[in-house]
Image (spheres, helix red, strand yellow):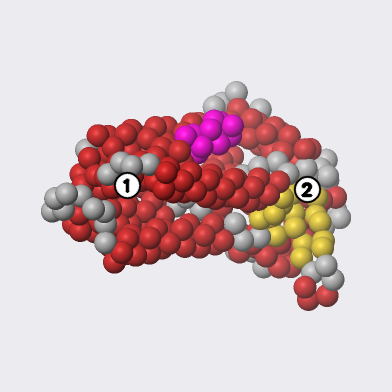
Amino acid sequence: MTAEALDPLIHVPARLQIMAALATLPEGDQLSFKRLQDMLELTPGNLITHLRKLEEAGYLATNKTGSGPASRTSVALTYDGRHALDIYATTLRGLLNGV
Amino acid sequence: MTANVGPSGGTPEEARMEPREAARLLAQTQADARRSLDFRAPWVSLVAAVVALAGFGIVWLNVRDQHPFTGPSLASLAVFYGLIALRIATVIYAYAHARTGVSGRSVNVQRDEAIVMSGVLLVCYLALIGIANSGSHGAGFYWSLFLNGILIALAAVWAGRCAIHKNWHEAALTVPVALIAALAAIAGPRGMWLVNGVGLCVLLLANAAIGKWQRRATRTYTVQTGA
């Protein structure tokens, strides 16, 4: 098995961090964009770019409430996203254990 | 970013992390996120330990020479409840700080649990006030019932809540709380304040130390060990 077996969408530092951080939330919970940005210390533009890619793949869902300055965007991993991260971690373990 | 897009949308340029680096990043990010989102930080337990020792200790200093026992003075009770209010304030602050930006099911569940615990506390107080008003025992009996009864009731309700959530670490913590309160009841109306103060302080300090150790342990947690 080689590193190419790893999901290339997740195997990018910023996206791996996004997926890993969101996976610590219980299912049914969401994290605000601002809090995620603070936790990962990413710029808003950078975070938006990576979130969009993950959302397009169906790995996460965003939810926007309100409008204007009071609007709030929350993100959460989808079932597919959690599953993809599980597979990624399993593959990673296999690679590190020389499987 | 449109050229050389991988099967899931990634690009070869982006996928340059070594597996070991990815494993470290995954484990580190999850450990940091868990720590950041958990309001039960070791410092919260540390404050609770100090509050328990100081609160119960002040009342014990007030009643230890009472013969016969007449109950704590209003001043010592004011300090006692003031310290409890401080403890509640630190928990609310830690919760608000840790859970900022989090919404969804678990937030609603925790809010409902807080309401249930407040309700249990209120029912306990009302029941014990009712018992005190209708009985003819000495002050020592009522104070013992009041203090230790509430501690045991809260520990029992919290144990049930932890069992529902399969949070065995916290569930295990409620057993010594109930045991300390039971031991305090045996120690009598004067000694119970000291037993509760020292017992809860030691328990909370141990909990803070375990929490600190667990947080440190997760820093070295790698994907090989199941992160």
Q: Is residue B151 left or right of residue A84?
A: left
Secondary structure, magenta segment, majority class: helix
Q: Position of residue A38 (x, y in %)?
A: 61, 64
Q: Secondary structure at mark 2?
A: strand
Q: Secondary structure at mark 1?
A: helix
Q: Position of residue A1 (x, y in %)?
A: 66, 27
Q: Nearer the viewer, residue A94 or B101?
A: B101
Visible in this render: residue B185? yes
Q: Nearer the viewer, mark 1 or mark 2?
A: 1
Q: Is residue B189 magenta?
A: no
Residue receiving disc 2:
A60
**For the magenta stretch, what is the residue range?**
B156-167
Look at the picture and state if A29 lies above or below A40: above
Among the 4 quarters of the image, the one containing residue B18: top right
Q: Position of residue B45 (x, y in %)?
A: 38, 51
Measuring 20% from the left and 54% from the top, which residue is drawn there? B63
